[in-house]
Amino acid sequence: MIVLTSCGATANESPANPAAAMEQNTEQQVAAAPHSDIRETVALQFSAYEASSNPLPLRSLAADEYTRISTKEMSRYAIEIYKKAGDDETIYAALQIGPDAYEIGQIGYPSAPDDLYTVQDVQALSAEYIKVTGVCGANCPITYYIKLNDQIPVLHSRIDAHTAEADINGDGSNEMIATVGTAADTTIYQASGDDIVAANVNEALDAQAVLYQSSANLFQSYAAGELEPTNWSFKENALHRVP
């Protein structure tokens, strides 16, 4: 599967390290407010992620439709970064497989540095994806997950957030963790049979901000009025407080 990220609003500059900037902004956003009670275990309410139930084939792109800016070569394919004729405000991405090009969508804006556009092969939700990421301003990311079905590329999902893939519950399959916003809003995506379901961690914890710490495989929640986070692990569709 291929994943691509970007954002939908233009800006003159973007953070060099979006994750670090998000964490710093999260601490600044937690303003004084009443203290909230801490529970030891909180069940997450997962619901169907509708975008995954109807993946769309990517549109074929003719050579005369775009002007290439740069190319990111991978072993089985390439990602073309390009402009469309008559559109000077938006940067797009396309998937190149052999002689064929397929339009992915918007990835950024003209003044964004090229190294903010990334591509990698990832495993998540018991499948392989191509992941492409970009940015069009502060706190407005977009991530595309693309899957090759018999070499026919389909857009599995577009998530307007910074994403990570990690086995957060120890079941041997990577879940997707998506975080967006100055006061970080975090959602977990996981497989449920042939479907994908999602749950918002902030809502479950009634937290003003939630960050995922990949090094410790923990979630950190910030309640309003608290500068020190509460740590949580994820197992069996529930968050468990870690002392």
Image: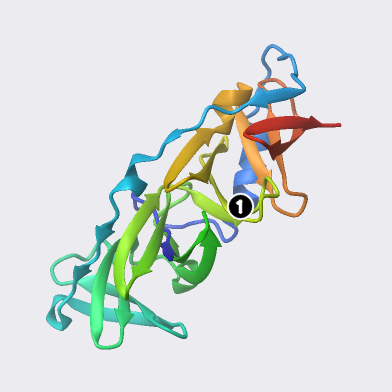
Q: Which of 121 and 93 is in front in this view?
A: 121
Query: Given the current orientation, which residue lies at the most extreme right position?
Result: 243
169 left or right, relative to 216: left
**Count of numbered tags:** 1
Residue nearest the observer in this picture, 105 or 102: 102
What residue is pinned by disc 1?
19
**What amino acid type should be assigned to the residue bearing mark 1?**
Ala
Looking at the picture, tell me which residue is in the foreground, 241 or 22.
241
With respect to residue 102, does 202 lie above or below? above
Q: Where residue 65 sits: x, y (%)?
A: 14, 76
Eyeballing the image, is 135 above or below 51? below
Which element carries disc 1, helix, strand or loop? Answer: helix
Left or right: residue 114 compared with residue 51? right
- Residue at 47% from the left image edge and 45% from the top image edge: 193
Q: Indicate the position of residue 96 as horizontal and vertical percent values.
A: 31, 80
Q: Which quadrant would residue 37 be assigned to in this image?
A: top right
